[in-house]
Image: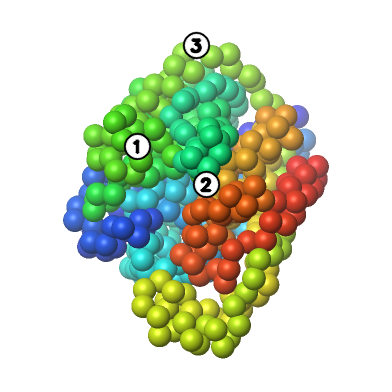
Amino acid sequence: MTDLRLGTATADITPTWPLTLAGFAARTEPAQGVSRPLQVHVSVLETSHDGSPPRRAVVVVADLLWWAAEDVDSLRQAIATESGTTPDMVLLSATHTHSGPQTSHRASREIGAADPRFTTLLREQVLTAATAAVAKLEPVTIERFVGSCDLGFNRRAERNHPGPVDATLTVIRFERANGSPATLWVHFTCHPVITQEPLISSEFCGVAMTQVTDRVGAPAIYLQGCCGDINPVVPGEARSWRGTDREVVQAGTMLAEAVTGLLATGTPEPIAPIPLAAHALAVDLPFDSVPSVELLRERTSHCGLDGEVAQALLAHPEWCNPTIPLMLQRLDIAAGCSLLAINGEVVVEYGLRIREWSGGSVLPLGYANGMTGYIPTARIIAEGGYEAGDAAPYFFLPGPFSPHVESLLDDAIITILAH
């Protein structure tokens, strides 16, 4: 018999000083205030099985664009030490809000410059929350609810009308022995890109989780899916990132109502705990081409993004390798309930495949454990556009990906699902 315990804690990571926001090259002015505070949520899970030593896993979710790849290893080690587990059992997930600070130096300053003061704040608050979560460990059971929400649309619809969408809404409810909810994990797939206002904001994800928390009386934590090409629908706007906080609230409320409605009318599926386990896999994704040193030297005198990328690649020749590793981490939470974290901006088709190939038992997470860049399919690469390769310079990638990335990633997904 396996027993499960859970402890959660939340810490504020809202910076109190002016800094640039990450996510939009068109937004050039620094943050002028706070619209919605930023938080980090830590869930510590512990299983004990037939007298064997307990196992712990840690799921960290923060209101960030992404986690800095250069900090992930040391942070996972620190969290593991603080929580009494090993780094492979630590998963870092980001909501992908475009109204928070930049965390990584492997990203163009056009989408936000990393501030070391925020990096320090983030690390301190994550470790503080991890300590608090361990102290709150208590016995829980798990139920799963599956429904839908029509908040998202495929922003590449003009190239591939209407384009695939993942409208699945999954809620994992952890319950105490008395039947009261301890924590909710809410998994959905949609870009938090409603507003370009120069205001710090957790975007619609934060609005939704705050409303659900207030209504249910337990912390609600947002798990972001593979939303690389999925944007939220904003009434009256052809492109959803032209909205304001009013539209942020509208979208957040729509998601919150879908969650609470699902909890009220949906059929819960009990999930049996099993010993916690983690599996990892790296797949080398090839670039279509890599510029020569001579070409990069010529480009260093160019203005704007082109020159910045050339300078960055010359300063880091290891970034000009013909391939880049994409990391996959599967965390098994319970029988038929796992998380699959990918450190990339993954388009929705991969998330849909993960759901299908796992029979719905695995929840895909993009923007987890660092950031590689946009991960397109071969079709998207052939169609062209932002996700296909135009975004590559913002991640200091040496070039667009080869169409072969699709078959390589599909094989990796199949392998890690079968592990």
Q: In the image as oriented, which residue stretches furthest toward the left?
A: 32
Q: Amino acid at mark 3?
A: Thr
Badge 1 or badge 2: first in the primary sequence: 2
Q: Give the secondary structure at mark 1.
A: loop
Q: CA distance from mark 1 to mark 3?
A: 33 Å
Label 3 belongs to which residue? 265
Q: Please tell me which residue lies in front, 214 or 371.
A: 371
For residue 106, side relative to residue 343 (left or right): left
Is 268 drawn above or below residue 115 in the view shown?
above
Q: Amino acid at mark 1?
A: Ala
Look at the image and tell me whether residue 42 can be seen: no
For residue 62, side relative to residue 5 (left or right): left
Q: Nearer the viewer, mark 1 or mark 2?
A: 1
Badge 1 or badge 3: first in the primary sequence: 1
Label 1 belongs to which residue? 238
Q: Residue at x 36, y 41 (%)?
A: 239
Q: Nearer the viewer, mark 1 or mark 3?
A: 1
Disc 1 crowd rating (10 Å Cα; few below 14, some 14-19, many 20+) is few
- Quadrant of res 115: bottom left
Q: Give the secondary structure at mark 3.
A: helix
Residues at badges 2 and 3 in contact (C-beta under 8 Å)?
A: no
For residue 97, side relative to residue 226 (left or right): left
Label 2 belongs to which residue? 228
What is the tally of numbered marks visible in this picture? Answer: 3
Is 183 drawn above or below residue 306 in the view shown?
above
Q: Give the secondary structure at mark 2.
A: loop
x, y percentage for residue 335? 72, 31
x, y percentage for residue 311? 46, 82
Is 7 drawn above or below residue 295 in the view shown?
above
Q: Quadrant of the C terminus?
A: top right
Q: Which of the labelled discs sits on residue 143, or is there none? A: none
